[in-house]
Image (cartoon, rainbow, N blue to C red):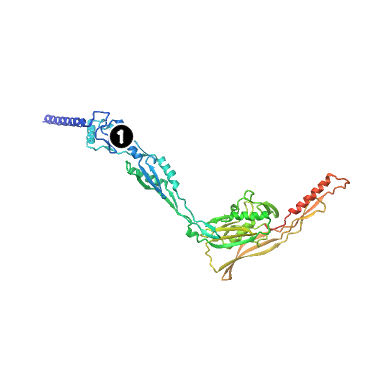
Amino acid sequence: MKKKVLLTTVFVLGCIVVMLLSGYMIYGAKTNFGDKSHIIKGVKIEGNDVGGLKENAALDKVSAYSDKIIDRQVNIEINGQTVVATFGALGVSCDDAKYVEKATLLGKTGNVFKRFSEINKAAKGKINYDIDVNFDDDKLVSFVEDRLSIFNKKVRNSRLKLINGNLRATKSSEGVFVDVDATVEALRKLIKENSSAGDDLSIDAEVEIKKPKYTKNELRKCTDLLGSFSTSYGSSSADRASNVQTACKYINGTVVYPGKTFSTIKTIKDRTVENGYKVAAEYSSGMVVDGVGGGVCQVATTLYNAVLFSELKVVERSPHSMVVAYVPHSRDAAISGDYKDFKFKNNTKYPVYLVGSASGGILTFKIFGNDTRASNRKIEFVSEDTETLQPGDPVEKVDKTKPAGYREVTQSAHIGYKSKLWKVIYVDGVETKRVQVNDSKYNAEPEYITVGKAAEASPSPSPSPSDDSAKEDKKENKKENSDSDSSTDR
């Protein structure tokens, strides 16, 4: 019995093999499976029938189709502009040879059952290779950065400008910037989902919107006059007047934003000839000397008083070493080198705009902003001298180059003071508060006198070289007298 079953099983298996071989021969005859140089019939790559073609011919056919993929266009919209790019320009490529090689090996490798299955599927049109596109990420990123970023639109804050004597707020606009990473990912997704040849594609670039920090509606609120102050420089020398005008020019038009600190020294630039400054009288170590930029302290002082009336926060202020003539005591602000500055902070919620003018011997600063102070509230500033410091006895300086009996006052005496500045607040004309603003000390300086003590020349009946020396001394004395400056207007 067992023998009979075994024989039956062998017979059935034999029949199956014969049937498979017969089917294989029949399909093989139809699909040229025996020709290893041709692709079996029915195979497609991206819908393109390559069955029956040799490998090179199939590669040419597939490459021609891939070129259509690479040349497919994408219209990228950004900030109202359209940038046209092909898949190839975006770093896309197709590996044609890989799929042609796969197609060529179909039905020709593996056991008979594997081959038969592949031939059967191909004959039924079930084998179609979709071409996957490859991305050159560096090329794609570079395209977005180089070709799309040029259409970025910078954010534009509103600015304050003085136009025909009136303060105006300029237009503001949003900034639009391409989001490189997000745009790259959007393009990759679009291409992967449309990786065949076809019509043009369109996409909007991914962008970031940046709002302006200050809009026109906000800055048009900053046209209130917060405070102003004027001083006279009409008696100054031409060079000193020029320095006042130069420093004023650098400050004029400055905008100080909320929370920011204004520095006079930084704004008026270094006091050098290259920056437009000239040599004029100034204070130095209790003496009146000539220096480049002499007179700029009057600019700092005038601005200081405008800041006081605007009630902005004074960050740094120093008195002069000696009193000045153009403001009351404690109302001055000295600057020197890079260590003595006048600074103030914009402690309001809106920008402030500085307008400076220096003409006809009058220096004026006006500060504009958003005034929230009550209309029935007024302020004034009162100086109070708490102590007077006497200059003491004159100081004589011997000059051996001057003849005996020579005497000249080279600097007049300066009385010193200790002083306080008070801010007085009135509501409906009634004083409600008095606040001390600062303490100031101005040094007393004695009168300085130069006296001559040169040895007397021996008389000679005939001209000698000493006569020439005497003439030169006389010229030098005349020059010294004309150059001396006892002014305290710094």
Q: Nearer the viewer, residue 378 or 387?
A: 378
* Residue assigned mark 1: 61
Asked whether 102 or 360 is in front, the reply is 360
Q: Which of 77 and 485 is in front in this view?
A: 77
Q: Relative to 2, say whether 90 is above or below.
A: below
Task: For mark 1, give the secondary structure.
Answer: helix
Residue 485: quadrant of the picture: bottom right
The image position of residue 247, as x and y in percent, is: 61, 54
15 vs 424, left or right, is: left
Image coords of residue 323 (percent x, y): 68, 59
In the image, residue 369 above or below residue 290: below
Residue 265: x and y in percent read 60, 53
* Residue 64 coordinates in the image, percent (x, y): 32, 36
Identify the residue at horizontal 76%, vertical 54% (top origin). Answer: 481
Q: Is residue 426 visible?
A: yes
Q: What is the residue that sits farthest to the front in this orientation?
A: 164
Does residue 318 appear in the picture of this structure? no
Q: Which residue lies furthest to the left in this view?
A: 1
Horizontally, is 279 left or right of 370 in the view? right
